[in-house]
Amino acid sequence: MKLARRFLPALLGVAALAAIPLVVKNSFFLHVCILVLMWTVLGAAWNVLGGFAGQVSFGHAALFAVGAYTTIILYLKGGLAPWWGIPLGGLAAAVVSLPIGFLCFRLRGPYFSLSTLAVAEIVKLVALNWESVTAGSVGYLITSLPPLSILGASVNWEGKVPFYVAAAILTVIALAATGWLRSSRIGAYLVAIRENEDAAEAVGIDTVRTKALTFALSAFLAGMGGGFYAFYFRYVDPDAVAGIGLSMEMVFIAVVGGLGTVGGPLVGAVFLTAVAELVRERFQAGHLIFYGLFMMLVIRYMPEGIWGRVRKIIDGKKGGS
Amino acid sequence: MALLEVEKLTRNFGGVCAVSNLSFSVTEGEILGLIGPNGAGKTTVFNLVTGFVRPTSGAIRLDGRSVVGLRPHAVARRGIARTFQIVKPFPGLSVRENVTLAAFLRHPARPEAEAAAEKVLERVGLSPRVNELASQLTLMDQKRLEMAKALATEPRLVLLDEPMGGLNATEVDVASALVQRIRESGVTVVLVEHVMKAIMRISDRVVVINQGEKIAEGPPAKVVEEPEVLAAYFGKKRVA
Ligand SMILES: Nc1ncnc2c1ncn2[C@@H]1O[C@H](COP(=O)(O)OP(=O)(O)O)[C@@H](O)[C@H]1O
Ligand SMILES: [Mg+2]
């Protein structure tokens, strides 16, 4: 019974994800769904570190960029198909996260946040200037994707469905990882670190190791998100994949959805992508004002996030447990 | 052999010598009182022993093995637990979860950790409060929680930093009894306390420090009669 209750929402979610491309034939709508899923993965990546462990990073674009560049370079220079490049991009980001964590985790609170911001700027500068590897500001463009056939049918890269499927798989991985984390001992340690780092150390929690492992997981997910970006948009340059806007967007999604929740990033991505698309259509100029206004309203009236609030209401009705 | 040996321990903060050439040892099974006026360096000693602060020089050994250079979590794993003078709970979590987090150190699986936490909570008298948020406890209960977290790591030695500070007379009696029960359960105790009545009653031995240096050591009743101690406490001219 308990097991069923825990996994039922997950099963329903997977079923809904699988049903969307069967029902929806409109390619713009599928495109929006793909964006939502990509942002879900990125929000979940950020949430693992920021929401659970309370380590607010303003530099996750750096990890996204490492994933995006790894995937596109492996394909263009090494001929390795993006579906291998995406997990390798995640791994590369996880490896890069180790020295970043080593440097930044010495600092706490706002100082940690600012140091991650600085690291992201450094990564962007490296991407701009290390032209032999990154092609500098010119960037990389994928003109055609490798042929692939699944169950005898060859995949049509001009349609949206294959990308939707890839994004859905990444989303399931990201949310499953978060769900596992929440129920694990490491997840409890992260909450302890968020609540009081000294107290956590005092009761025997290796805070540095726990934060580093979590950062690596967060980086792995963000790197896969970056790899997916390269695969879907087929274009990578420093502005597109290493901008500070990207880092901020990940923060917004996790916060609006609900910090430290499993479903939050999905909810946050749905709302923010929907709001962004709606206001972009109606108001040519100044659409970001409405986007910002929406953010402010949520933070002011639902500091626990949309999904956080919904969960509170559900749990409250169950008599709290 | 002593359980804890502190030898020529020194720690400077800039120009201030918070702990200076301090040596003492703790015998297994005793309650050692560590006393001294405000700013004497008592909390710094605890920070040094538990790895929150690195010594400038000197040695700290548990069971003959050095713990200098270990990070606090590793010291906890070796078997030294502490409480904080200014309590440090996990404020947004329930009392039960606070203690369970500490119990994970010896019980990696959650059900066992929760069961162990439950027992510790009972020992310190917090069982009625298990579902409350740590931030909502009274001061007395916050001090109890502080002890519960330390005990849940199943230490051999526990360092209590003013567990009675700010409590009223009745609460001090309850806390004293609790400290004695901790010792009876086989855990060695070092107690920093300002409440002299409690120190005198429950310590087997006291070490007095002033300005980072040891000025006296011995049975509580004897030590408080020493002129240096009186001078340190009542601001009389130090005896040369
Ligand atoms: N982290 C620190 N940085 C600078 N000075 C410190 C630090 N910790 C303690 N001190 C100084 O060391 C001295 C001893 O402090 P403390 O150990 O807290 O004394 P006690 O606990 O006996 O009241 C004080 O002068 C205090 O200001
Ligand atoms: Mg003190």
Image (spheres, coloured by chain):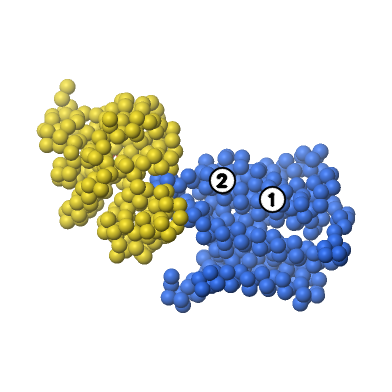
In the drawing, does residue A22 fall left or right of residue B174? right
Q: Chain of mark 1?
A: A
In the drawing, does residue B203 fall left or right of residue B4? left
Q: Position of residue A216 (x, y in %)?
A: 61, 48
Helix, strand or loop at mark 1:
helix
Q: Position of residue A155 (x, y in %)?
A: 85, 63
The reply to whether residue A241 is in sight is no
In the image, A214 versus B20, the foreground residue is A214
Helix, strand or loop at mark 2:
helix
Q: Which mark is residue B202?
A: none
Q: Which mark is residue A90?
A: 1
| Chain identifier matching the blue colour in the rendered picture | A
In the drawing, does residue A177 fall left or right of residue A304? right
The reply to whether residue A87 is in sight is yes
Residue at 26 percent of width and 59 percent of height: B125
> Which residue reaches farthest top?
B240
Residue at 43 percent of width and 35 percent of height: B70
Q: Which mark is residue A212?
A: 2
In the image, B74 versus B234, the foreground residue is B74
| Chain identifier matching the yellow colour in the rendered picture | B
Tell me the distance, in whole angstroms, between the alpha carbons under discs 2 and 1: 15 Å
For the N terminus of chain B, the image quarter is top left
**What crowding class fits label 1: few (fewer than 14 Cα within 10 Å), some (14-19), or many (20 or more)?**
many
Q: Chain of mark 2?
A: A
Q: Position of residue B197 (x, y in %)?
A: 15, 45
In the image, B184 versus A32, the foreground residue is B184
